[in-house]
Amino acid sequence: GIQVEQSPPDLILQEGANSTLRCNFSDSVNNLQWFHQNPWGQLINLFYIPSGTKQNGRLSATTVATERYSLLYISSSQTTDSGVYFCAPTMDSNYQLIWGAGTKLIIKP
Amino acid sequence: DAGITQSPRHKVTETGTPVTLRCHQTENHRYMYWYRQDPGHGLRLIHYSYGVKDTDKGEVSDGYSVSRSKTEDFLLTLESATSSQTSVYFCAISGLAGGEQFFGPGTRLTVL
């Protein structure tokens, strides 16, 4: 089946720093979502981005489906950005989300 | 925010007892999903539904059953809970096949 790899697995930054999280996938996908799981366990939708670039405030995401990767950019990090970021593409064949292992982000004040 | 609630939010039970978790949505979305999340495994799909009375298995369906008698409710049942089913369970909804999924707050289940 499709493999999803996220990097880096862990990231520790100071408040105000910028970061780029990467998601590689091994096969063609129908769509892709980025989620943030906050320290209380809540899963929050960030982007639904099959291709192209989207921006929402300090966050933006780019998916290049033909090259099988997606990037999540976080600018001017805040402590509330801490948590785990998941990439989850959807397979063409059955539309189920395939989850990466996540990137754990810690923003220090 | 998508209107998704899960109940109970926390449950402690004993091995061998039946357990039912409920997911309720107010969005009238066709697709509903149950996932479990364990340390080191990310989220794994248990079962999903693509309409009332229409369900299918995910990758970790053994030991679980589901039912959907109404659009808004999706029930997950552990017929005889085991300690390996201790986990956090998330419900999700989607309006389209392969469409954007929205998650409920989760249920933390502990099987002693």
Image (cartoon, rainbow, N blue to C red):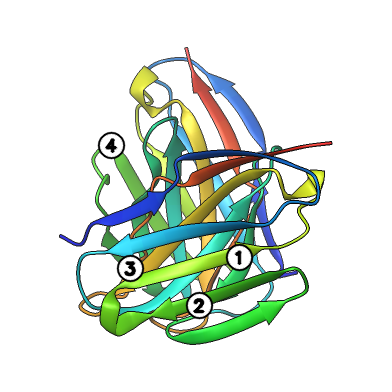
Q: Residues within 10 Å of mark 2 (few under 14, many from 20)?
A: some
Of callouts 1 and 2, which one flags the residue occurring earlier in the amino acid sequence? 2
Residue placed under numbered mark 1 in the picture: A73
Q: Please state if B19 lies on the left or on the right of A30 as rendered.
A: right
Name the residue rendered at 46%, 47% in the picture: A102
Q: Amino acid at mark 2?
A: Thr
Counting from the top left corner in percent of width and height, residue B112 is at 47, 12
- Tell me whether the residue at label 1 lies in contact with that at label 2, contact meaning CB atoms closer than 8 angstroms: yes
Residue located beneath label 3 in the image: A96
The quarter of the displayed image where residue A67 is located = bottom left
* Image location of residue A13, percent across then percent down: 68, 41
For mark 2, what is the residue? Answer: A62
Q: Are discs 4 and 2 located on one and the same chain?
A: no
Residue nearer the viewer, B47 or B72: B47
The chain identifier of the residue carrying mark 4 reads: B
Residue B45 point in image, percent of width and height: 35, 53
Label 1 and label 2: CA atoms lie apart by 8 Å
Between the residue at mark 4 and the residue at mark 2, the CA separation in whole angstroms equals 39 Å
Separation of disc 3 and disc 4 at Cα? 20 Å
Label 2 with label 3: CB-CB less than 8 Å: no
* B1, above or below A80, in the image: below
Task: Name the kind of residue labelled 4 in the image.
Answer: Gly
**Between B102 and B11, the one nearer to me in the picture:** B102
